[in-house]
């Protein structure tokens, strides 16, 4: 009769513990059952594998050879079974996770998380909805979204927040426009260039105007749009400057990017509700956190553990 996987596992437990009793406890078997499995294995192989060495069990030469051969095989088998079990568990998670997000985080964090989920949990689907920062917390609190991605939260009653990263605002300067020296730069260094800004109802515009007030300069938009790509397009077409988050400033080869500083930094917040905490939502949160942890690009940093 050919040896069985159970017999090999029993032999490995005895070899590793040096005692039948300890092996029996590890395997949740009786001592006679362990002894029986070893005898069957020795009979199948045709050679003794164990011998008594005082109060311990020692390996014969054949046992030493078998141990060296079977240990990596059983290790690889256990690893394969663990991978199959993880894939099975991942496939069992299914559902829709509604994400309320800023446009810049939609194109970076949400897309990155959706890509991870497609591989790990193919039956989980992210549905994102872009909205203004002030509306995101309300959407999560009211149950219209399962989680939110924003950069400010005035009221957090009943919600949980976590800082995922810190992000710079940047000036995207179109080709042909004078490029100020240094990085970061102040808004005063951008004076005289056509500015492309978010409309006043957006919190990003308020942040830009706060920066201007701190520097004692005035900002006047030559073009306004809630679409970040449109702001960059205006700057490119007119030798102007678009003030946008760093995350959407990449991939435009004919522009120059300068960080705004030193106060042009905002925290990226993950907002969740205890009511909506399910295994499916937890999987989506984990994917978003992993995407954020894989940043940091120039101008983005991870939060310290205290945050």
Image: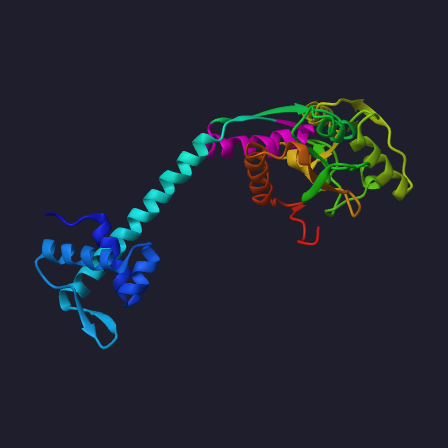
Quarter of the rendering containing residue 179? top right
Position of residue 154 relative to residue 222, above or below, is below
Q: As drawn, which residue projects farthest toward the bottom?
A: 54
Residue 253 seen anywhere in this rendered image of the structure: no
Position of residue 41 relative to residue 264, above or below, is below
Is residue 294 or residue 223 the one in the foreground? 294
Q: Position of residue 261 (x, y in %)?
A: 78, 46
Quarter of the rendering containing residue 197? top right
Q: Position of residue 270 (x, y in %)?
A: 67, 38
Q: Relative to residue 217, is residue 71 drawn left or right?
A: left
Is residue 27 or residue 109 the one in the foreground? 27
Is residue 126 or residue 302 the one in the foreground? 126
Q: Position of residue 113 (x, y in %)?
A: 55, 34
Residue 260 seen anywhere in this rendered image of the structure: yes
Q: Relative to residue 140, is residue 30 drawn left or right?
A: left
Residue depicted at x 74% and y 48% = 182
Is residue 56 or residue 232 the one in the foreground? 56
Residue depicted at x 15% and y 58% = 39
Q: Position of residue 285 (x, y in %)?
A: 59, 37
| Badge count | 0
Task: Please check the rendered image and state whether residue 185 is part of the magenta-colored stretch, yes or no.
Answer: no
Position of residue 26 relative to residue 2, above or below, is below
- What kind of colouring is applied to the model shown? rainbow
Q: As drawn, which residue projects farthest toward the left?
A: 46
Look at the magenta stretch and give its main secondary structure: helix
Residue depicted at x 61% and y 45% = 296
Residues rendered magenta in the picture: 98-122
Task: Please check the rendered image and state whether residue 118 is part of the magenta-colored stretch, yes or no.
Answer: yes
């Amino acid at each position: 009769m050919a040896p069985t996987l159970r017999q090999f596992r029993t032999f490995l437990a005895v070899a590793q513990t040096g005692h039948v009793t300890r092996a029996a406890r590890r395997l949740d078997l009786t001592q006679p059952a362990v002894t029986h499995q070893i005898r069957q294995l020795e009979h199948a192989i045709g050679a003794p594998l164990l011998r008594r060495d005082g109060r311990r069990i020692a390996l014969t030469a054949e046992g030493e050879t078998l141990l060296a051969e079977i240990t990596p095989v059983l290790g690889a088998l256990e690893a394969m079974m663990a991978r199959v079990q993880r894939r099975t568990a991942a496939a069992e998670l299914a559902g829709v996770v509604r994400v309320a997000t800023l446009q810049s985080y939609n194109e970076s964090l949400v897309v990155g998380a959706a890509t991870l989920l497609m591989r790990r949990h193919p039956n989980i689907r992210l549905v994102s909805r872009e909205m203004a920062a002030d509306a995101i917390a309300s959407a999560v609190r009211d149950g219209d979204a399962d989680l939110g991605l924003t950069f400010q939260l005035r009221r957090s009653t009943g919600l949980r927040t976590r800082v995922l990263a810190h992000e710079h605002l940047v000036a995207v300067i179109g080709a042909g426009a004078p490029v100020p020296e240094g990085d970061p730069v102040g808004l005063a260094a951008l004076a005289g260039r056509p500015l492309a800004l978010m409309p006043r109802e957006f919190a990003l515009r308020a942040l830009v105007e706060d920066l201007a007030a701190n520097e004692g300069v005035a900002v006047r938009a030559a073009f306004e749009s809630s679409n970040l790509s449109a702001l960059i397009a205006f700057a490119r077409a007119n030798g102007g400057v678009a003030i946008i988050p760093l995350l959407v400033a990449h991939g435009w080869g004919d522009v120059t990017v300068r960080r705004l500083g030193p106060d042009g930094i905002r925290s990226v917040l993950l907002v969740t509700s205890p009511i909506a905490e399910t295994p499916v939502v937890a999987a989506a949160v984990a994917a978003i956190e992993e995407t954020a942890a894989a940043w940091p690009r120039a101008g983005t940093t991870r939060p310290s553990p205290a945050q």
